[in-house]
Image: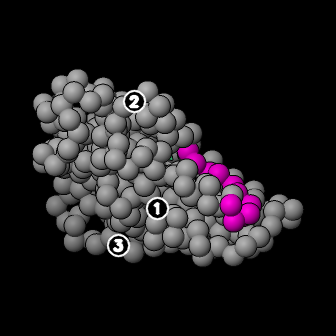
Amino acid sequence: MDVLKIVPRGYCYGVVDAMTMAKRVAQDPSVPRPIFVLGQIVHNRHAVQELEQYGITTLDGASRLELLEEVPAGATVIFTAHGVSPAVKERAAARGLHLVDATCPDVTRTHNLIRSKISAGYAIIYIGTPGHPEPEGAMGEAPPDRVALVTRPEDVAHLTFSPDSPLAIVTQTTLSQWDTDLVIDAIRLRYPHAEVHNEICLATQNRQEAAVQSADAVDLVVVVGDRRSNNSNRLVEVVEKIGGKPSVRVENVADLNADWFKDVSRVAVTAGSSTPSRITREVVNWLSALSDVTLTQ
Ligand code: SF4
């Protein structure tokens, strides 16, 4: 079986920066202790475990605003690459916490865009994943009655904005570009005048395009990524829907099953932008050991 390592794959610059910043903070004796991350720094438990080794505790499971109340007075809190709403920043400052902002610059750009559109009198139709921290933070830039979340074309029927109100369509950074186009088309059918601001980041686009192209040449694409990683799940989707090939997502080498590869002569491996390269390397090594292989870069 040949193993094709898809390029680019794995950590994007936003994730590298967030991890580096968190580790640097942990190594700085002048930073107040204890140190917490508000939610998973990126959606990958291996990355979270890596930070634990630096003495950083991850708070997880609720909205960012609720999580903030778990941080003791005087402590340090790190905002993740997904960004946080202004309400979280204000509350953290009001509590006198020491703040470290590891928001990805691409997410910050989306926040700035929403703020400027709101100031100009627009309402926002945000295309994103319910329950994900990035929409929570970005949508928090708008008053609740001037922002609505849509995920699928069917959701457009539930929008209540009047037909003549100024509207801006803004997207989450880690969506499938093909699915997003369908949602945008559905919105524009109902609101033809809505401005489109596609905020899917370059790292997400490049990984999706490379995965779809490589799917052509293989029988199966393995995506290494956490189950909560939006961009990893989207990679599986685009390989199946656009590339027309089967795809499986595994969190790490322990998830692999030799039976999946019985009839596979060529497999491709990619990884979400929140997946540490060590985890992907272990998966590639496992596949390589499965049979006589030719490694292709
Ligand atoms: S996936 Fe895109 S938006 Fe998210 S951290 Fe990486 S570069 Fe930033």
- Whether the magenta-drawn stretch holds residue 196 is answered as no
Quarter that holds the N terminus: bottom left
Say which amino acid is labelled 1. His
- The answer to whether 75 appears left or right of 28 in the picture is left
Of 174 and 161, nearer the camera is 161
Task: Tell me if residue 247 can be seen.
Answer: yes
Tell me which label, 3 or 2, sits earlier in the chain.
2
Are discs 1 and 3 less than 8 Å apart at CB? no
Say which amino acid is labelled 3. Asp
Q: Which residue is mark 1?
A: 43
Are discs 3 and 2 less than 8 Å apart at CB? no
Per the rendered image, the range of residues in magenta is: 94-104
Q: Which residue is mark 3?
A: 255
Place of residue 77 in the rendered image (x, y in percent of width and height, measured from the top left): 67, 64
Q: Which residue is mark 2?
A: 121
Task: Tell me if residue 202 can be seen.
Answer: no
Query: Based on the displayed image, in which of its 4 quarters is residue 176 positioned?
Result: top left
In the image as oriented, which residue stretches furthest toward the right? 30
Of 130 and 73, nearer the camera is 73
